[in-house]
Image: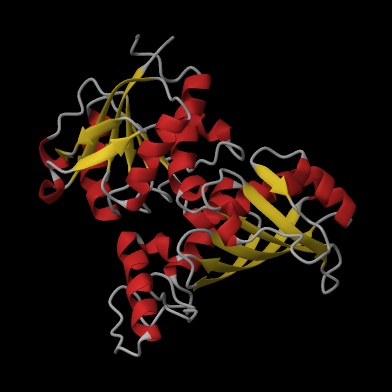
Amino acid sequence: MMSYKVAVVGATGAVGREMLKTLSERDFPIKDIAALASGRSAGMEVSFGEKRVLKVQNLETFDFSGWDIGLFSPGASVSAVHAPRAAAAGCIVIDNTSHFRMEPDVPLVVPEVNPQALAKIRRGIIANPNCSTIQMVVALKPLHDAFGIRRVVVSTYQSVSGAGKEGMDELLLETRASLVHDPIVPQQFTKQIAFNCIPHIDKFMDDGSTKEEWKMVVETRKILDPDIKVFATCVRVPVFIGHAEAVSVEFARPVTVAQARAVLRDAPGVVVQDNREDGGYTTQLECQGEDATFVSRIRVDRTVEHGLGFWCVSDNLRKGAALNAVQIAETLIAQGKLVRKAA
């Protein structure tokens, strides 16, 4: 069996740690593994599986020659420098940051949705989409194939882990402070996140959208279909892990709830829990640590001719980041695009 040398870049962050965990859990065929981060983190230890500990190496001085796969999640500005350096050394980079996503010669891939895009690797770099985009297109793809999507309106309810460990720490500290009436000074978010919702993720753009909302629009069109119209509102909510989305879809062809439910049940990466009773749906808490995108609350949208709405949730650190990156690597192997190293 072939095995591969894998470097995880940003290994001390929330997504990097999840990448290491996911590689171990899925028994990815590894010949050697390296945990990389900035110089200030060099020498730290991170877990790889239950029994192995890796010492973090300095990304700045790491030589990618002879390494097969680089799973990157270090921040966009860092990937901008080191992903091309790794690719030039022959290491295929799967980058979780936003830096390369919209570059036309870089595939933007969700394996359940557009694995064929991996045929167009030109620069040795593959982009992992935004976490909120990934779970939405996993649910939209089978519906688009069956009924043709014209327009999507989505509101997201995104956990603080989307802002990294610092965001999670801020929610914890602010929650404690609120309960004992201590003063709160937001650091990572623009307003208090504890017991609050903030309709602002990433920077504002000229048209009033935030960059997070823009990402959902352009990434969905690049992955799924450039003719689909998307309107997004992205909200940060006081949840530690797991993103939720309320999605309304206008289709080109007639569709019933029963038809949509059947299509989604047969779709890879989707779990349907859609019972019209108390608790007959999946929430953010229940998707934590799970690989699937969970779809609930499927119902007719009577404001358009062929419309449906649904609720979907997914673990943003897993399917929204680490798992999708590892699945891309697995798909490369299945397609015969990683063949260098033998065990």
Q: Is residue 299 left or right of residue 161?
A: right
Name the quarter where the N terminus is drawn. Answer: top left
Q: Residue at (38%, 40%) from the top-left corner?
A: 19
Image coords of residue 176 (percent x, y)? 36, 78
> How many discs mark residues in the rendered view?
0
> Quadrant of the rendered structure where residue 104 is?
top left
Closer to the camera in the image, 24 or 227 = 24
Q: Residue at (22%, 26%) from the top-left corner?
A: 89
Image coords of residue 259 (percent x, y)? 87, 49
Image coords of residue 311 (percent x, y)? 69, 62
Closer to the camera in the image, 131 or 240 = 240
> Quadrant of the rendered structure where residue 193 is?
bottom left
Name the quarter where the C terminus is drawn. Answer: top left
Does 66 sit above or below residue 64?
above
Closer to the camera in the image, 275 or 111 = 275
Does 231 sit above or below residue 52?
below
Q: Residue at (38%, 85%) from the top-left corner?
A: 178
* Residue 225 in sight: no
Closer to the camera in the image, 181 or 229 = 181
Q: Is residue 264 left or right of residue 97?
A: right
